[in-house]
Image (cartoon, rainbow, N blue to C red):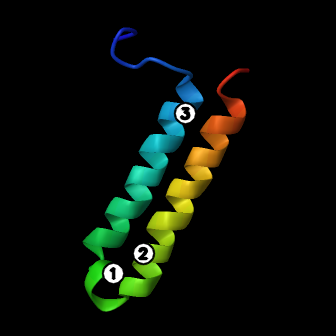
Amino acid sequence: MKNIFIGPKNHWILLIFITLVIFSCGLNHMHVSLFNLFISIVFISSGLLLIYILKNKNK
C-alpha cells in the first residue's frame, strides 16, 4: 500500500475528510436546494486543502 499512497499520511487524512464533507453535502441535496452554499463549501474546502498541502509538502 505504500506504493499507492505516496506522500504524508496527514495529506491523505485531510483529503478523505474533505471528500466526506462534500459527499455529505451532496447526500443532503445541497447541490440542488442551496447551490451557492454548496459551491462555496466545495471551493473553500478545496482551497484550504491545497494551501495546507503546499505549505507542508517539504516538511
Is tag 3's residue or tag 1's residue first in the polypeptide sequence? 3
* Residue 47 left/right relative to 16: right
Q: Is 12 situated above or below 43?
A: above
Residue named by callout 2: 39
Measured as percent of width and height from the top left, residue 39 is found at 42, 75
Amino acid under label 1? Met
Identify the secondary structure beneath mark 2: helix
Q: Is 13 situated above or below 40?
A: above
Residue occupying image coordinates x 50% and y 55%: 46
Amino acid under label 2? Ile
Question: How many numbered callouts?
Answer: 3
Residue occupying image coordinates x 53% and y 42%: 14
Q: CA distance from mark 3 to mark 2?
A: 22 Å
3 and 2 marks in contact (CB < 8 Å)? no
Amino acid under label 3? His
Residue named by callout 3: 11
Residue occupying image coordinates x 37% and y 88%: 34
Is tag 3's residue or tag 2's residue first in the polypeptide sequence? 3
Mark 1, Cα crowd under 10 Å, few <14 / some 14-19 / many 20+, is: some
* Residue 59 left/right relative to 32: right
3 and 1 marks in contact (CB < 8 Å)? no
Identify the secondary structure beneath mark 1: helix
Q: Please state, as top left, top right, bottom left or bottom right, where the C terminus lies in the image.
A: top right
Measured as percent of width and height from the top left, residue 55 is found at 71, 36
Q: CA distance from mark 2 to mark 1?
A: 9 Å
* Residue 38 left/right relative to 46: left
Measured as percent of width and height from the top left, residue 49 is found at 57, 48
Mark 3, Cα crowd under 10 Å, few <14 / some 14-19 / many 20+, is: some
Residue occupying image coordinates x 56% and y 65%: 44
Residue named by callout 1: 30
Measured as percent of width and height from the top left, residue 52 is found at 65, 43
